[in-house]
Image (cartoon, rainbow, N blue to C red):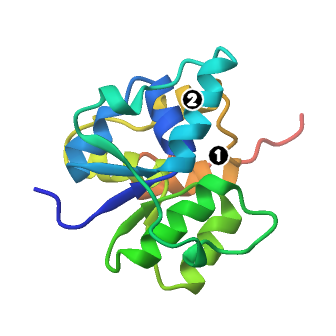
């Protein structure tokens, strides 16, 4: 089933949950691990009234603590969840990270860690036949508050073979 350990940050878990697609993580990767900081972030969201998943109630998801605080990247602008995802990735060579944050992805790339993001999960789900189309899910993610640039959405839709044909310029009348 799982080919390697999958470690997710908060935003993929939260936004896939909010759009009713959290189960895609299990269907694609089997078990998914979240660092303790992600579990804390979700709990804090619940206390503020955000509809968040309860990690303890998801049979295919479990929290994992970082073994050594020395492996947590010391980057001021990196959130604790992202830092712990990267730390667990460093502690578990060959793992797959699920990250949306640009800085976290840069650091993961510099550390030669394998990663994808929420939109990458959707593309893979479509390729595996788990979704007929990702376009409505992308719209739902945006409606739920996930910021996605138009350029990124266009690229992802192209990768999913859902790119709309280029518009012809209209001539002024």
- Name the residue: 50% across, 24% down: 18
Q: 123 or 56, which lies in front?
A: 56
Image coordinates for residue 97, horizontal then vertical, percent:
43, 63
- Name the residue: 56% across, 33% down: 42
Image coordinates for residue 93, horizontal then vertical, percent:
34, 80
Q: Residues within 10 Å of mark 2 (few under 14, many from 20)?
A: some
**Mark before the other along the chain sequence, 1 or 2:** 2
Tell me the quadrant of the picture where the N terminus can be found. Answer: bottom left
Label for residue 43? 2
- In the rendered view, does 102 fall on the left or right side of 51? right
Nearer the observer: mark 1 or 2; the answer is: 2
Q: Determine the image quadrant of residue 134.
A: top left
Tell me the quadrant of the picture where the C terminus can be found. Answer: top right
Farthest residue to the front: give it.
68
Label for residue 167? 1
Image coordinates for residue 35, horizontal then vertical, percent:
47, 53
Q: Determine the image quadrant of residue 23.
A: top left
Can residue 144 be seen? no
Q: Is residue 149 above or below residue 159?
A: above
Q: Is residue 11 above or below residue 9?
A: above
Can residue 82 be seen? yes
Element under label 2? helix
Q: 84 or 14, which lies in front?
A: 84
- In the rendered view, does 149 fall on the left or right side of 154? right
- Name the residue: 57% across, 29% down: 43
Q: Residues within 10 Å of mark 1 (few under 14, many from 20)?
A: few
Give the spatial CA distance, label 1 vs label 2. Answer: 45 Å
Element under label 1? loop
Q: Determine the image quadrant of residue 40.
A: top right
Image coordinates for residue 67, horizontal then vertical, percent:
44, 69
């Amino acid at each position: 089933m799982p080919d390697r350990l999958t470690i997710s940050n908060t935003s993929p878990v939260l936004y896939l949950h909010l759009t009713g697609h959290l189960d895609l993580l299990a269907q694609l990767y089997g078990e998914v691990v979240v660092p303790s900081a992600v579990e804390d972030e979700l709990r804090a969201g619940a206390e503020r009234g955000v509809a968040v998943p309860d990690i303890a109630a998801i049979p295919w998801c479990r929290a994992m603590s970082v073994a050594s605080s020395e492996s947590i990247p010391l980057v001021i602008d990196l959130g604790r969840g992202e830092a712990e995802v990267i730390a667990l990735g460093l502690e578990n060579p060959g793992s797959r990270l699920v990250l949306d944050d640009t800085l976290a992805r840069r650091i993961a790339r510099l550390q030669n860690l394998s990663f994808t993001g929420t939109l990458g999960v959707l593309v893979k789900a479509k390729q595996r036949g788990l979704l007929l189309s990702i376009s409505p899910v992308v719209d739902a993610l945006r409606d739920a508050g996930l910021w996605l640039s138009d350029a990124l959405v266009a690229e992802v839709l192209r990768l999913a073979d859902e790119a709309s044909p280029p518009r012809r310029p209209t001539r002024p009348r």
